[in-house]
Protein backbone atom coordinates (compact mmCIF):
# COMPACT_ATOMS: atom_id res chain seq x y z
CA UNK A 1 0.00 0.00 0.00
CA UNK A 2 1.35 3.47 -0.83
CA UNK A 3 1.63 6.24 1.74
CA UNK A 4 -1.21 8.11 -0.01
CA UNK A 5 -3.50 5.05 0.15
CA UNK A 6 -2.74 4.57 3.83
CA UNK A 7 -3.39 8.25 4.51
CA UNK A 8 -6.74 7.99 2.67
CA UNK A 9 -7.72 4.94 4.73
CA UNK A 10 -6.86 6.88 7.90
CA UNK A 11 -8.91 9.89 6.79
CA UNK A 12 -11.89 7.60 6.02
CA UNK A 13 -11.61 5.83 9.38
CA UNK A 14 -11.33 9.18 11.16
CA UNK A 15 -14.82 10.15 9.95
CA UNK A 16 -16.31 7.09 11.68
CA UNK A 17 -14.71 7.37 15.13
CA UNK A 18 -14.72 10.01 17.85
CA UNK A 19 -10.97 10.70 17.77
CA UNK A 20 -8.73 13.77 17.50
CA UNK A 21 -5.19 13.33 16.17
CA UNK A 22 -2.59 15.74 17.58
CA UNK A 23 0.91 15.79 16.10
CA UNK A 24 4.14 17.55 16.94
CA UNK A 25 6.27 19.24 14.25
CA UNK A 26 8.94 16.53 14.66
CA UNK A 27 6.64 13.83 13.32
CA UNK A 28 7.27 12.37 9.88
CA UNK A 29 5.65 14.56 7.25
CA UNK A 30 3.06 11.88 6.31
CA UNK A 31 1.81 11.93 9.91
CA UNK A 32 1.76 15.74 10.05
CA UNK A 33 -0.45 15.64 6.94
CA UNK A 34 -3.22 13.53 8.51
CA UNK A 35 -3.25 15.28 11.91
CA UNK A 36 -6.22 17.39 13.02
CA UNK A 37 -3.85 19.72 14.84
CA UNK A 38 -0.13 20.33 14.53
CA UNK A 39 1.95 22.41 16.94
CA UNK A 40 4.69 22.90 19.50
CA UNK A 41 4.34 21.65 23.08
CA UNK A 42 2.43 24.70 24.30
CA UNK A 43 0.01 24.85 21.38
CA UNK A 44 -0.70 21.13 21.68
CA UNK A 45 -1.38 21.45 25.44
CA UNK A 46 -3.79 24.29 24.71
CA UNK A 47 -5.52 22.31 21.98
CA UNK A 48 -5.75 19.29 24.28
CA UNK A 49 -7.51 21.55 26.80
CA UNK A 50 -9.72 23.61 24.53
CA UNK A 51 -10.35 21.82 21.24
CA UNK A 52 -9.86 18.07 21.54
CA UNK A 53 -13.48 17.37 22.45
CA UNK A 54 -13.48 13.71 21.50
CA UNK A 55 -13.55 10.57 23.64
CA UNK A 56 -10.14 9.52 22.28
CA UNK A 57 -7.03 11.56 21.48
CA UNK A 58 -4.20 10.01 19.46
CA UNK A 59 -1.01 11.86 20.35
CA UNK A 60 1.76 11.63 17.76
CA UNK A 61 4.48 13.02 20.00
CA UNK A 62 6.60 11.77 22.90
CA UNK A 63 5.29 10.46 26.21
CA UNK A 64 5.44 13.69 28.24
CA UNK A 65 3.23 15.42 25.66
CA UNK A 66 0.64 12.63 25.80
CA UNK A 67 0.85 12.56 29.60
CA UNK A 68 0.21 16.31 29.72
CA UNK A 69 -2.83 15.89 27.45
CA UNK A 70 -4.08 13.09 29.68
CA UNK A 71 -3.59 15.13 32.88
CA UNK A 72 -5.57 17.99 31.33
CA UNK A 73 -8.26 15.58 30.08
CA UNK A 74 -8.66 13.07 32.86
CA UNK A 75 -12.04 11.94 31.48
CA UNK A 76 -10.62 11.12 28.02
CA UNK A 77 -8.47 8.35 26.59
CA UNK A 78 -5.10 9.55 25.33
CA UNK A 79 -3.33 7.06 23.06
CA UNK A 80 0.31 6.85 21.97
CA UNK A 81 0.76 5.06 18.63
CA UNK A 82 4.10 3.63 19.82
CA UNK A 83 4.10 3.36 23.59
CA UNK A 84 7.93 3.48 23.71
CA UNK A 85 8.14 7.00 22.32
CA UNK A 86 9.76 8.81 25.22
CA UNK A 87 11.88 11.94 25.71
CA UNK A 88 15.22 10.93 27.27
CA UNK A 89 15.68 14.43 28.68
CA UNK A 90 12.92 13.69 31.23
CA UNK A 91 15.14 11.02 32.85
CA UNK A 92 17.56 13.70 34.11
CA UNK A 93 15.13 14.73 36.85
CA UNK A 94 13.36 12.59 39.45
CA UNK A 95 10.82 13.66 42.10
CA UNK A 96 13.44 12.84 44.75
CA UNK A 97 15.93 15.23 43.14
CA UNK A 98 13.33 18.02 43.02
CA UNK A 99 12.54 17.50 46.71
CA UNK A 100 16.26 17.66 47.52
CA UNK A 101 16.67 20.95 45.61
CA UNK A 102 13.59 22.38 47.31
CA UNK A 103 15.00 21.43 50.69
CA UNK A 104 18.24 23.24 49.86
CA UNK A 105 16.45 26.30 48.43
CA UNK A 106 13.13 26.41 50.32
CA UNK A 107 12.35 30.00 49.30
CA UNK A 108 12.73 29.45 45.53
CA UNK A 109 9.90 28.42 43.20
CA UNK A 110 10.57 25.35 41.04
CA UNK A 111 9.99 25.78 37.29
CA UNK A 112 9.75 22.52 35.39
CA UNK A 113 10.15 22.14 31.64
CA UNK A 114 7.19 20.26 30.24
CA UNK A 115 9.73 17.67 28.97
CA UNK A 116 9.55 15.88 32.32
CA UNK A 117 7.58 13.09 33.96
CA UNK A 118 4.20 13.71 35.56
CA UNK A 119 5.66 12.73 38.95
CA UNK A 120 8.29 15.47 38.61
CA UNK A 121 5.71 18.05 37.55
CA UNK A 122 3.70 17.13 40.63
CA UNK A 123 6.58 18.38 42.84
CA UNK A 124 6.99 21.73 41.06
CA UNK A 125 5.30 25.16 41.21
CA UNK A 126 4.88 25.85 37.52
CA UNK A 127 5.53 24.24 34.14
CA UNK A 128 6.99 25.93 31.10
CA UNK A 129 7.69 25.09 27.47
CA UNK A 130 10.40 26.39 25.18
CA UNK A 131 8.01 29.10 23.96
CA UNK A 132 7.20 30.62 27.34
CA UNK A 133 10.18 29.81 29.63
CA UNK A 134 11.34 33.45 29.80
CA UNK A 135 7.83 34.70 30.55
CA UNK A 136 7.30 32.07 33.27
CA UNK A 137 10.63 32.78 34.98
CA UNK A 138 9.81 36.51 35.02
CA UNK A 139 6.34 35.78 36.42
CA UNK A 140 7.85 33.63 39.20
CA UNK A 141 10.22 36.45 40.19
CA UNK A 142 7.26 38.84 40.53
CA UNK A 143 4.87 36.49 42.27
CA UNK A 144 7.39 35.00 44.73
CA UNK A 145 9.50 38.14 45.09
CA UNK A 146 12.76 36.24 44.45
CA UNK A 147 15.92 36.80 42.40
CA UNK A 148 16.36 33.20 41.32
CA UNK A 149 14.34 30.10 40.46
CA UNK A 150 14.97 26.37 40.39
CA UNK A 151 14.75 25.11 36.81
CA UNK A 152 14.93 21.61 35.30
CA UNK A 153 15.58 19.34 33.59
CA UNK A 154 17.03 21.17 30.55
CA UNK A 155 20.13 23.15 31.58
CA UNK A 156 20.29 24.84 28.15
CA UNK A 157 16.72 26.13 28.29
CA UNK A 158 17.39 27.24 31.89
CA UNK A 159 20.48 29.08 30.67
CA UNK A 160 18.48 30.69 27.86
CA UNK A 161 15.77 31.85 30.29
CA UNK A 162 18.49 33.26 32.55
CA UNK A 163 20.32 34.97 29.67
CA UNK A 164 17.18 36.76 28.46
CA UNK A 165 15.40 37.46 31.76
CA UNK A 166 18.57 38.19 33.80
CA UNK A 167 17.04 36.06 36.57
CA UNK A 168 19.30 33.35 37.95
CA UNK A 169 18.23 29.77 37.25
CA UNK A 170 19.55 27.02 39.50
CA UNK A 171 19.76 24.00 37.23
CA UNK A 172 18.12 20.79 38.39
CA UNK A 173 20.48 19.07 37.47
CA UNK A 174 23.53 20.84 35.95
CA UNK A 175 23.75 18.53 32.91
CA UNK A 176 20.18 17.91 31.69
CA UNK A 177 20.07 18.25 27.91
CA UNK A 178 18.52 17.08 24.64
CA UNK A 179 20.71 14.69 22.65
CA UNK A 180 19.42 16.16 19.37
CA UNK A 181 19.90 19.89 19.95
CA UNK A 182 23.07 19.66 22.00
CA UNK A 183 24.85 18.00 19.03
CA UNK A 184 24.86 21.30 17.12
CA UNK A 185 28.23 23.03 17.47
CA UNK A 186 29.65 26.42 16.54
CA UNK A 187 31.75 24.64 13.89
CA UNK A 188 28.59 23.18 12.33
CA UNK A 189 27.08 26.65 12.12
CA UNK A 190 30.22 28.16 10.63
CA UNK A 191 30.32 25.41 7.99
CA UNK A 192 26.65 25.76 7.00
CA UNK A 193 26.90 29.56 6.97
CA UNK A 194 29.88 29.32 4.63
CA UNK A 195 27.73 27.31 2.24
CA UNK A 196 24.66 29.55 2.60
CA UNK A 197 26.05 32.94 3.62
CA UNK A 198 22.89 35.00 3.13
CA UNK A 199 20.63 33.05 5.46
CA UNK A 200 18.78 33.59 8.70
CA UNK A 201 19.78 31.15 11.42
CA UNK A 202 16.84 29.93 13.53
CA UNK A 203 17.61 27.70 16.53
CA UNK A 204 15.76 26.06 19.39
CA UNK A 205 16.55 27.22 22.96
CA UNK A 206 17.63 23.64 23.78
CA UNK A 207 20.84 24.43 21.83
CA UNK A 208 23.95 25.41 23.77
CA UNK A 209 24.58 29.12 24.44
CA UNK A 210 27.49 29.48 21.95
CA UNK A 211 25.21 28.27 19.17
CA UNK A 212 22.25 30.36 20.33
CA UNK A 213 24.48 33.44 20.36
CA UNK A 214 25.07 33.04 16.61
CA UNK A 215 21.37 32.85 15.79
CA UNK A 216 19.12 35.49 14.24
CA UNK A 217 16.20 33.98 16.11
CA UNK A 218 15.81 31.63 19.08
CA UNK A 219 12.41 30.07 19.67
CA UNK A 220 10.15 27.05 19.96
CA UNK A 221 9.25 25.05 16.88
CA UNK A 222 6.02 27.00 16.36
CA UNK A 223 7.84 30.30 16.89
CA UNK A 224 10.46 29.36 14.27
CA UNK A 225 7.65 28.43 11.88
CA UNK A 226 6.02 31.82 12.47
CA UNK A 227 9.34 33.64 12.01
CA UNK A 228 9.81 32.04 8.58
CA UNK A 229 6.16 32.61 7.66
CA UNK A 230 6.22 36.29 8.62
CA UNK A 231 9.61 37.07 7.06
CA UNK A 232 9.45 39.52 4.17
CA UNK A 233 9.57 37.90 0.72
CA UNK A 234 13.14 39.10 0.10
CA UNK A 235 14.31 36.95 3.05
CA UNK A 236 14.62 33.66 1.20
CA UNK A 237 17.09 31.42 3.01
CA UNK A 238 16.87 29.86 6.47
CA UNK A 239 19.20 27.55 8.37
CA UNK A 240 17.18 25.49 10.83
CA UNK A 241 18.69 24.39 14.13
CA UNK A 242 16.17 21.86 15.30
CA UNK A 243 14.78 18.43 14.43
CA UNK A 244 14.28 17.85 10.71
CA UNK A 245 10.50 17.40 10.90
CA UNK A 246 10.00 21.15 11.28
CA UNK A 247 12.15 21.86 8.25
CA UNK A 248 10.06 19.44 6.15
CA UNK A 249 6.88 21.21 7.25
CA UNK A 250 8.23 24.66 6.39
CA UNK A 251 9.66 23.52 3.05
CA UNK A 252 6.21 22.22 2.13
CA UNK A 253 4.29 25.26 3.38
CA UNK A 254 6.68 27.95 2.05
CA UNK A 255 7.82 26.68 -1.37
CA UNK A 256 9.32 30.05 -2.32
CA UNK A 257 11.80 29.93 0.55
CA UNK A 258 14.85 27.71 1.03
CA UNK A 259 15.55 25.78 4.20
CA UNK A 260 18.86 24.18 5.16
CA UNK A 261 19.68 21.91 8.10
CA UNK A 262 22.14 23.30 10.65
CA UNK A 263 23.66 19.82 10.78
CA UNK A 264 22.97 16.55 8.96
CA UNK A 265 20.76 13.97 10.68
CA UNK A 266 19.14 16.14 13.33
CA UNK A 267 16.62 13.45 14.11
CA UNK A 268 14.76 12.72 17.32
CA UNK A 269 14.48 8.94 17.03
CA UNK A 270 11.99 8.90 19.87
CA UNK A 271 9.58 11.16 18.00
CA UNK A 272 10.01 9.05 14.88
CA UNK A 273 8.81 5.83 16.51
CA UNK A 274 5.25 6.46 15.35
CA UNK A 275 4.04 5.57 11.88
CA UNK A 276 0.85 5.57 9.79
CA UNK A 277 0.24 1.84 10.31
CA UNK A 278 0.18 2.31 14.10
CA UNK A 279 -2.19 5.27 13.79
CA UNK A 280 -4.49 3.24 11.54
CA UNK A 281 -4.39 0.40 14.09
CA UNK A 282 -5.46 2.80 16.86
CA UNK A 283 -8.31 4.17 14.77
CA UNK A 284 -9.54 0.59 14.40
CA UNK A 285 -8.75 -0.42 18.01
CA UNK A 286 -9.00 2.69 20.20
CA UNK A 287 -9.88 0.58 23.23
CA UNK A 288 -6.51 -1.23 23.18
CA UNK A 289 -5.24 -0.48 26.70
CA UNK A 290 -1.62 -1.18 25.68
CA UNK A 291 -1.55 2.22 23.97
CA UNK A 292 -3.40 4.26 26.57
CA UNK A 293 -1.41 6.78 28.61
CA UNK A 294 -2.50 6.64 32.22
CA UNK A 295 -1.17 8.85 34.96
CA UNK A 296 -2.08 7.70 38.50
CA UNK A 297 -4.89 9.93 39.70
CA UNK A 298 -3.06 11.35 42.75
CA UNK A 299 -0.07 12.37 40.58
CA UNK A 300 -2.33 13.68 37.81
CA UNK A 301 -4.21 15.93 40.27
CA UNK A 302 -0.96 17.41 41.61
CA UNK A 303 0.68 17.73 38.18
CA UNK A 304 -2.39 19.54 36.85
CA UNK A 305 -1.67 22.52 39.14
CA UNK A 306 1.67 23.60 37.55
CA UNK A 307 0.30 22.86 34.06
CA UNK A 308 -2.81 25.01 34.63
CA UNK A 309 -0.63 27.72 36.15
CA UNK A 310 1.56 27.75 33.05
CA UNK A 311 -1.49 28.01 30.78
CA UNK A 312 -2.82 30.91 32.82
CA UNK A 313 0.50 32.81 32.53
CA UNK A 314 0.97 32.28 28.79
P1 LIG B 1 8.66 22.72 21.19
O1 LIG B 1 7.79 22.98 22.36
O2 LIG B 1 9.45 23.89 20.75
O3 LIG B 1 7.90 22.13 20.06
O4 LIG B 1 9.79 21.68 21.63
C1 LIG B 1 9.54 20.42 22.12
C2 LIG B 1 10.76 19.63 22.13
O5 LIG B 1 10.76 18.53 22.58
C3 LIG B 1 11.97 20.23 21.61
O6 LIG B 1 12.97 19.28 21.54
FE1 LIG C 1 13.18 15.16 23.85
FE2 LIG C 1 15.12 16.26 22.38
FE3 LIG C 1 13.36 14.60 21.24
FE4 LIG C 1 12.63 17.05 22.05
S1 LIG C 1 14.06 16.53 20.43
S2 LIG C 1 11.49 15.16 22.36
S3 LIG C 1 13.86 17.27 23.93
S4 LIG C 1 14.84 14.08 22.84
Image (cartoon, rainbow, N blue to C red):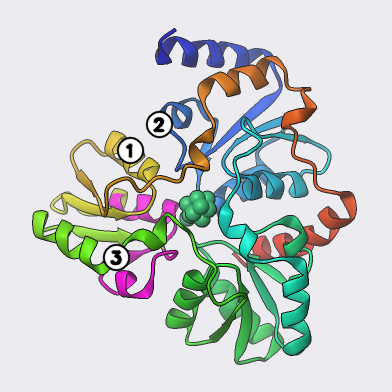
Residue 271: mark:
none
Quarter of image, res 36? top right
Front in this rendered view, residue 108 or 254: 108
Quadrant of the snapshot with the N terminus: top left
Eyeballing the image, is 104 above or below 97? Answer: below
Q: Is residue 241 magenta?
A: no
Q: Which residues are magenta?
A: 205-228
Mark in front: 1 vs 3: 3
Report which residue position mark 2 lands on.
Answer: 29
Eyeballing the image, is 120 above or below 1? Answer: below
Q: Taking the image as drawn, is residue 115 in sight?
A: no
Tell me whether circle 1 and circle 2 mark residues in contact (CB < 8 Å). yes
Please provide percent x and percent y for residue 300.
82, 53
Q: Residue drawn at (13%, 52%), measured in percent from left and top? A: 234
Kindly state the secondary structure of the residue where label 1 is placed: helix
Which mark is first along the chain, 3 or 2? 2
Quarter of image, res 73? top right
Q: Residue drawn at (59%, 23%), measured in percent from left and top? A: 279
Report which residue position mark 1 lands on.
Answer: 248
Q: Residue drawn at (65%, 39%), measured in percent from left and top? A: 51
State the CA–CA distance, disc 1 to disc 3: 22 Å
Eyeballing the image, is 42 above or below 148? Answer: above
State the CA–CA distance, disc 2 to disc 3: 26 Å
Kindly state the secondary structure of the residue where label 3 is placed: loop
10 Å neighbourhood of mark 3: few (<14), some, or many (≥20)? some
Report which residue position mark 3 lands on.
Answer: 185
Amino acid sequence: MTVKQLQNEILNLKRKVDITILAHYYQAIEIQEIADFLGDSLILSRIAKEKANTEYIIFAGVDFMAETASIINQDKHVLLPNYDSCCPMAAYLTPEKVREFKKNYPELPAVVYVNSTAAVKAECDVCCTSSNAVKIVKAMKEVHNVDAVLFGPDANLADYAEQISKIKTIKMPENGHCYVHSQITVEDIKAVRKEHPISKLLVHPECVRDVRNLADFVGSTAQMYKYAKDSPSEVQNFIIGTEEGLLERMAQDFPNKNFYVAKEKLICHNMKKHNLELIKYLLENPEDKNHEVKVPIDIAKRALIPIEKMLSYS
